[in-house]
Structures are given as C-alpha cells and as structure tokens.
Image (cartoon, rainbow, N blue to C red):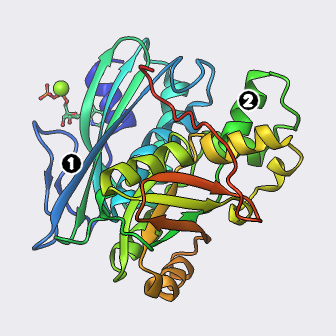
Amino acid sequence: MGEFELIRRYFQRPPPVGSAVVLGVGDDCALLQPSPGHQLAISSDMLVEGRHFFPDVDPEALGHKALAVNLSDLAAMGARPLGFTLAIALPQADEAWLAALARGLFALADASACPLVGGDTTRGPLNLCITVFGEVLPGRALRRGAARADDGLYLSGRTGEARLALELLRGGDWPGRLDAALRARLERPTPRNALGQALAATAGVHAAIDVSDGLVGDLDHILRASGVGAEILLEDLPVAPALQALPEAQRLACLLAGGDDYELLFTAAPEAHPAVLAAAAASGTSVTRIGRITASAGLKLLDAARREVPFTPQGFDHFA
Ligand code: ADP
Ligand code: MG
C-alpha cells in the first residue's frame, strides 16, 4: 500500500453536506467557508509517542484523543468547529492499527461536526499533529486575559481522574482500581465544545481556558493574563468517587495539578450566574462554581473555615 492509497483508504471521506468544507482531502489545499462576519480560531496540538502516550496505546483511543485535545482548545475559546487537518508520521503502514485510529478519529469528528479536510503523511517515529479550525463572532472569543475582579470562577465536570488513571497505569503505589470508566477519563477525554459555544454566547462570561496541564497551573495563565488573583474554596471542588479513597495529599495533587482533564475553567460576572447555569444545562454539561477572582494578585486555596491551605502547584512543562 503506497502513501496515496493509504490516505485514500483511511483518511479521505466526503465532507458532510452543510459543513463549511468547500473542498476537502485530495487537492493542494482544502477550502473552508466560514459563516459571514466570523473570525477564524486556529489551534495545533501534537501527540508524540513516549511523551504523550504509551507505545502500546489502543489506536482507536489515540485517534479520539488526538482530535479531542484540539477540539478542547476551540471549546476554551468558545469557537464552533469547522474542520481539521492531520499530519502523521508512521513507522509502518499497519492496516489494522490505521483502521482503528481512523475509527476513533472519525467517530469524534462526526459527533463534533468537525470534518478532516487535509493533512500530510510521512514515514517516521509515531507522531500526530492536528490543526483545528473554528469560527467565533468578533469580540465573543473567551480569552485568557478577560477575567475581572469579583467574577465567579467555574469548572466544568471534575478534575483528577486522568491523573489517577495515569498513576495506576504506571503501576506505582497509588491506591485504587483502574476500571474502564476511569481509564476512559485519561484515554478518551470529552471536549466541552457545546458548553464553550454556549458560554461565548452568554453575556457576562469573561475568560476561559481548558484544563490540560492541571487546574492550578492553568488558572495561573488566566490570572497572569488578566492581572488578577483568585480564591478557590477546596470543599466546593467536585470530587470523583474514584478519588474519594485517596490520601489527602494525593487527592489534592489529582484535583489541583492532575493534567489531561480537558475541562473548561472560566470566569463570569456575579450577575451572570443564572445565565451560566442555563448555558451548562442547555449543553448538558455539569458546571460548578469553585471560587472567585480577586483584585489582589495570587491564588489562595481556602478550607471550609476559610483558612489558607498550602499547596505548591506543579503544572506540566515540557522544558522545566
Ligand atoms: P502535497 O504533496 O500537495 O502536499 P500530499 O501528497 O501530501 O499533497 O497529500 C495529498 C492530499 O492528501 C492533500 O489533499 C492532503 O491534504 C491530503 N492528506 C495527506 N495526508 C493526509 C492525512 N493524514 N489526513 C488527511 N488528509 C491527508
Ligand atoms: Mg504533503
């Protein structure tokens, strides 16, 4: 099977009717038609074997996750997905492996109305780079620098399960059992696109980020970009059942510095609280108010008695 046969067999599918895709896979460029008056939102994420996934990862889950982490960036801006490209390096053309990868990829692409429109295919160490394209109305994108003092601080879903799953996969001394549901939180994350788009359309929602490197580390990006601080009420953080039996220090590490959560962390003016809950309900996504934005810089983690809890965040940094 040559390169072009491989592309045709696994990656070339007619774009869905009614999508923004005027011309998909097969020419020198794809052509996309955004809705009139919208801005393009563009993001790339690369997944490298040994760094982002284990060599023996289920290829179907890998296809899902490679697209999910990119869709999550569109969700964090409140942009509607239009399409994506896939650049892939493969050590060999293993047909069963490619078929499973394509299954995972296209299942999420179809569910998200985000068709594959082009890419590049080469031989090399396993590596996938996806670029997503989305659209958003001018002035409505949820930027990191838009948080304001007294905003409520909100989290979709809950953090920590992906980290616990990773620790259990690594086979360290963490207590717990790696069942399919917990493993899926690591290997098949759910990007929050419906919520992100609903929030971008909600007056009073200000800043957002997707939590990929840990709650505290990613919140810090919002705080620095916005020139504000925040308080998190630890007892208001949603805790997954799988995390409840963990010793306190490990539970906090999962909740606050877990990574790979792909939940949305966002801020909204106090008067927008009912509209935030309505956006959450309309998008079928749970949302919890976990704290607030403060005028003074820095992050405070508070216990039930509002005493400060010490915690040194370690967000993930490839070069730290
Ligand atoms: P070119 O040499 O003009 O860059 P290629 O031979 O790399 O074109 O690719 C041929 C067509 O297949 C192009 O439309 C390209 O976007 C598409 N393509 C290549 N690899 C992939 C892939 N992994 N997924 C989707 N489309 C791909
Ligand atoms: Mg090419």
Q: Give x and y (percent) for residue 315.
A: 52, 35
Quadrant into which the N terminus falls: top left
Q: Which mark identifies residue 254?
A: none
Q: Earlier in the sequence, mark 2 or mark 1?
A: 1
* Contact (Cβ within 8 Å) of mark 2 with mark 1: no
82, above or below 174, in the image? below
Q: Quadrant of residue 114?
A: bottom left
> Left or right: where does residue 263 sit relative to residue 198?
right
* Amino acid type, mark 1: Gly
Q: Position of residue 179 (x, y in %)?
A: 82, 42
Which image quarter is the C terminus in?
top left
Is residue 15 visible to the viewer in this orientation of the structure? Answer: no
The image shows residue 139, relative to residue 303, as above or below, that is below
**Residue behind mark 1:** 24
In screen coordinates, is 120 left or right of 163?
left
Q: Is residue 21 left or right of residue 28?
A: right
Q: Amino acid at mark 2?
A: Glu
Mark 1 residue CB less than 8 A from any atom of ligand 1: yes
Quarter residue 85 falls in: top left
Residue density around tag 2, few if under 14, some if 14–19, many if 20 or more, within 10 Å: some
Query: What's the distance in space between the residues labelled 2 and 1, CA to CA?
Result: 40 Å
In the structure shown, which secondary structural element does the residue marked by tag 1 occupy? loop
Question: Horizontal and vertical percent for residue 119?
Answer: 25, 34
**Total numbered circles:** 2
Q: Residue at x 42, y 59 (%)?
A: 296
| Residue 167 image label | 2
Tell me which residue sits at (73%, 22%) in the image.
Answer: 170
Name the residue at 56% across, 61% down.
231
Q: Horizontal and vertical percent for residue 313?
A: 58, 38
Quadrant of the image where one finds ligand 2: top left
Callout 2 secondary element: helix
